[in-house]
Amino acid sequence: MRSMRTKMLEGGRNRWAVVTLVAAGLWLAPAVSQAENRRGGDKPTEFAKLKLYEVQEGTDLRARGNAPVLRLANATLVGTATGDICAATATPNTPPQDPCAFDTTAISRVPLDRGKGDLDGDFQLFVDSMPDQQLLSDLVVVAKGGVEGTIDLTPLLFEGRPIATMEGKWKSRKLGVKGTFTGTFFVPFPDPTGTCSTEFAYAHPSVANAILCLEPNEMSLGNPVTKVLATFMKTGKMSQQEKDDDSESTDRE
């Protein structure tokens, strides 16, 4: 039986706009400040690599009097994580699932004259309770967290490049750790070489002027899906007093 996660990708609507999160063609973590090091912070270590796909987005352009138009985007991304983050999926009788399922929802706010704005959202980490079936309904949440940072749409809006970038901080009280993230959104475009079976391509994450063909599972109802590559770096542990975000909600763990 095909995975319902794959069906979700295939059943979504075509989304061309770059949205949020969390989601790293940069594959670099922001340096921890010297002040943090003086406070005895942990040396940053890679905690997770993420590959996510945008399966839903709602975009609203709001005029604000004489102020520049504000682009609001609310997006849902689904995909997988690899690395130390997947240790949370281990049980007494089973090893960690790596890669492990990872979802995020986030909101970005970008003034169109600047192309840069803020983002914030939530993420969830899952264990597949019945991996042989690979059904979405079998995914069980094992940890939650929050992200906040900035998104940069200037390559897409002003430079004609089909990418956007993001960076910021993440934390999870359930996992007991926090850190920084970087990421890149890859917006699909028609294949200029005529060699891709799907007829669409992404910009190559590390080779200038090169492309990567979209795979069939990176299409939705015959239309391409924006891909996000991101890296989570771990910089320290969370204290009992810290929350996943500034919200007083008890739903975050």
Image (tube, rainbow, N blue to C red):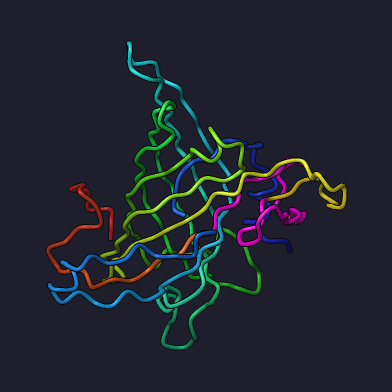
Does residue 162 appear left or right of residue 248 in this picture? right
Q: Position of residue 28 (x, y in %)?
A: 44, 65
Q: Quadrant of residue 112?
A: top left
- Note whether 113 is above or below 4 in the view shown: above
Q: Nearer the viewer, residue 200 or 74?
A: 200
Within the magenta stretch, is there residue 217?
Answer: yes
- Note whether 113 is above or below 123 in the view shown: above
Q: Position of residue 118 (x, y in %)?
A: 34, 40
- Note whether 237 is above or below 122 in the view shown: below
- Note whether 246 is above or below 156 in the view shown: below
x 63%, y 49%: residue: 8
Q: Which region of the structure is painted magenta? A: 203-229
Give the residue at the far top of this rendering. 65
x 66%, y 51%: residue: 203
Q: How many marks?
A: 0
Q: Position of residue 107 (x, y in %)?
A: 40, 40
x 79%, y 45%: residue: 191
Give the residue at the far bottom of this rendering. 93
Q: Position of residue 177 (x, y in %)?
A: 28, 70
